[in-house]
Amino acid sequence: MTQELRPAYRRVLLKLSGEALMGEHDFGIDPAMLALLADQVLEIRALGVEVALVVGGGNIFRGVGLAGAGMDRVTGDHMGMLATVMNALALQDFLERKGAYCRVLSAISIHPVCEDYIRRRAIRHLEKGRIVIFAGGTGNPFFTTDSGASLRAIEVGCDLMVKATKVDGVYDKDPFKSPDAVRFERLTYDEVLDRRLEVMDATAIVLCRDQGLPMMVVDINKNGNLKRAVLGENPGTLIESGDKA
C-alpha cells in the first residue's frame, strides 16, 4: 500500500518575481512558464495545502527604473502595481483552465476584474480550498512586492513562505558570475541582513524575522521543488528566525 504523503505545512505563500513569468522570453509572459507554475501549484494543492501567491510585475513594468529616469516615483509605483494585477490574472486563467478554483485579491480596487483585498475574505477563500493570488503589492508606493508578500503571508497566517528563484538557494555571491560561490543550506534572518545577501529587500526580511515566519528559497524551474518544500524537505535554502538548528 502506498504511504500517504503528509505536508509539513498547512498554509503556504509562494512569492514569484514578474521576471519568473518571462520564461525564455525577454519581456512579457511565457505561456509555457505559466503552465509549469500552475502544475506545481496544483500539485501541492492536491496534498491538501492551502496556497496563496504573490507575483511581481517586473516582466511588464518596473517603477523604480523609470523613477530613476525622472518619472515621479509614486506614479511609477502605481503603474508597477497594475502590472502585478495583469500577471495575477494571467496566472489565475491558467490555474482555472486546469480545474482549480482561484481568486485574485488586489490591494488597489479594480472591481470589474478582481476582488478587493480583505483579510478575512482571503482567509475564507483559503479555508474553502481556493488558491488566492494577492496583487497590487501593499497598495502603497515605496514598498516592493517582496514586502507585500511578507505582509500577506503574515496577515493570513501562513506557515511558510517560498521564494521562487532561478537558482537552487541562497549563495554568498552571484553563482552565475562566480564559479566559487558557496550555497547556504540554512540561514537566520539576521545573517541575511548582516551579510547583505540579496534574498529580499530588508523590510520584507525584518517582517519575517520579527513574526517568526520561515522562508525557503528554491529553484522554481526544477519541477518538484515546491512539492518537496511543503513536504518538509529542503531543496534550497531555509531561512528562519533565531539560532539555526
Image (cartoon, helix red, strand yellow):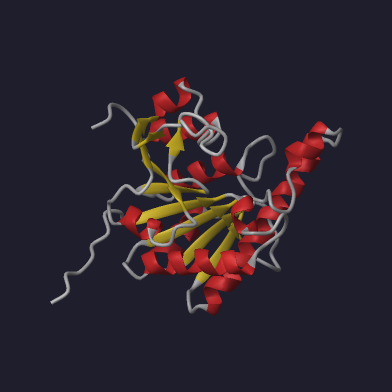
Query: Can the viewer see residue 10 in this picture?
Result: no
Q: Position of residue 228 (x, y in %)?
A: 33, 56
Q: Which x, y percent locates residue 4?
A: 20, 69
Q: Nearer the viewer, residue 209 or 165?
A: 165
198 on left or right of 89: left
Name the residue located 50 percent from the left edge and 78 percent from the top edge: 98
Residue 14 visible in the displayed image: yes
The quarter of the picture where residue 134 lies is bottom right
Counting every numbered tag in the picture gives: 0
Residue 224 horizontal side relative to residue 54, left or right: left
Q: Is residue 125 above or below residue 156?
A: below
147 displayed left or right of 120: right
The structure residue drawn at horizontal position 32% and vertical position 47%, both measured from the top left corner, is 234
Determine the image quadrant of residue 83: bottom right
Q: Residue at x 32, y 66 (%)?
A: 48
Q: Residue at the far left: name it.
A: 1
Task: Please tell me which residue is depicted at 35% across the width and 60% down the height of the picture.
Answer: 227
Q: Which percent across, then down, holds residue 196?
A: 51, 24
Of the pair 47 and 131, the residue shown nearer to us: 47
Observer-nearest of 234 and 126: 234
Quadrant into which the C terminus falls:
top left
Q: Is residue 168 above or below residue 221?
A: above
Instruction: Residue lying at the far right in this picture: please name it.
Output: 70
Residue 221 place in picture, x, y as percent:
49, 57
Relative height, residue 24 to residue 61 (above, below): below
Please state, as top left, top right, bottom left or bottom right, where the N terminus lies in the image.
bottom left
Above or below 36: residue 166: above
